[in-house]
Image (cartoon, grey):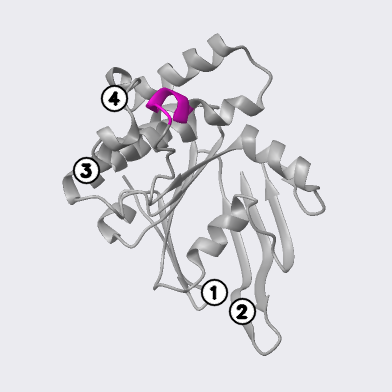
Amino acid sequence: MISLQNVEKVYQTTSIETVALDGINLEVQQGEFLSIMGPSGCGKSTLLNIMGLLDEPSAGDVILNGSKITGYSNKQLARFRNQNIGFIFQSYHLINDLKVIDNVELPLLYRNMSRKERYDLSVEALTKVGLKNRIDHFPNQLSGGQRQRVAIARAIVGKPTIILADEPTGNLDSRMGNEIMDILLKLNEEEGTTIVMVTHDESMALKTHRLARLFDGTWVEEKAFQH
């Protein structure tokens, strides 16, 4: 489902060169739930952004769903992201002036479908995360855990094959964090969604299929778990 081959990412200024990722090789199978851990600044979010086609590698190849992405135009990248990838961020990234249902519907605006189709899919996604009764609320009327549920609904509304989650429980207390994790596990187990999650919380990582650790832009350890 996801293949990174000798991926490097280097940030250059006039006076300094920073290597964010160095020779990353990674295979994520369809239906796998992979967690990535490592200290701040080790390249975790950069790696996730490259997987999600939000950033380009300085070298190496990215292959998603069997498609080699290298050389895609910005328009092709945007279309591929919209149809195949759902994003979940630590800080939710909801639009406060839009109702919950309208926030969830946003990715569908770029698809050729009727308003009723968009509405029905959005209600379906909100039902999956337990928020069907909140469709007409605004984000600032919700708790942090509820806002993250809305963000998950927005990520899954287009039925992506891949979900990329950057610290999805990072802003939540342990109870809310476990609830969000349970939703992700259910999506993975029942719908076969491939999930890659960056986290600082080892207790969350231990619930996934495999844990990869990054240090200074390179792999230092991989561990598989039996559940």
Q: Are marks 1 and 2 in contact (CB under 8 Å)?
A: yes
Residue 19's disc is 2
Query: The residue under label 3 is which amino acid type?
Result: Met
Image check: 48 left or right of 65? left
Question: Is residue 195 depicted above or below 141 in this figure?
Answer: below
Seen at 28% across and 18% down, the residue is 133
Query: The residue under label 2 is which amino acid type?
Result: Val
Q: Position of residue 73 (x, y in %)?
A: 81, 47
Q: Earlier in the sequence, mark 2 or mark 3?
A: 2
Dot 3 lies on which element? helix
The residue where tag 1 is placed is 217
Residue 130's disc is 4
The residue where tag 3 is placed is 176
Q: Hey, which residue is sitting farthest front in the picture?
A: 97
Dot 2 lies on which element? strand
Query: Is residue 32 in view?
Result: no
How crowded pointer 2 is (Cα within 10 Å; few <14, some 14-19, many 20+) is rated as some
Q: CA distance from mark 4 to mark 2?
A: 42 Å
Q: Earlier in the sequence, mark 4 or mark 1?
A: 4
Q: Position of residue 140 (x, y in %)?
A: 29, 37
Q: Hey, which residue is sitting farthest top in the picture?
A: 116
Q: Nearer the viewer, residue 162 or 206?
A: 162
Residue 95's disc is none
Seen at 72% across and 69% down, the residue is 58
How crowded pointer 1 is (Cα within 10 Å; few <14, some 14-19, many 20+) is rated as many
- Magenta stretch: dominant secondary structure: helix
Q: Earlier in the sequence, mark 1 or mark 3?
A: 3
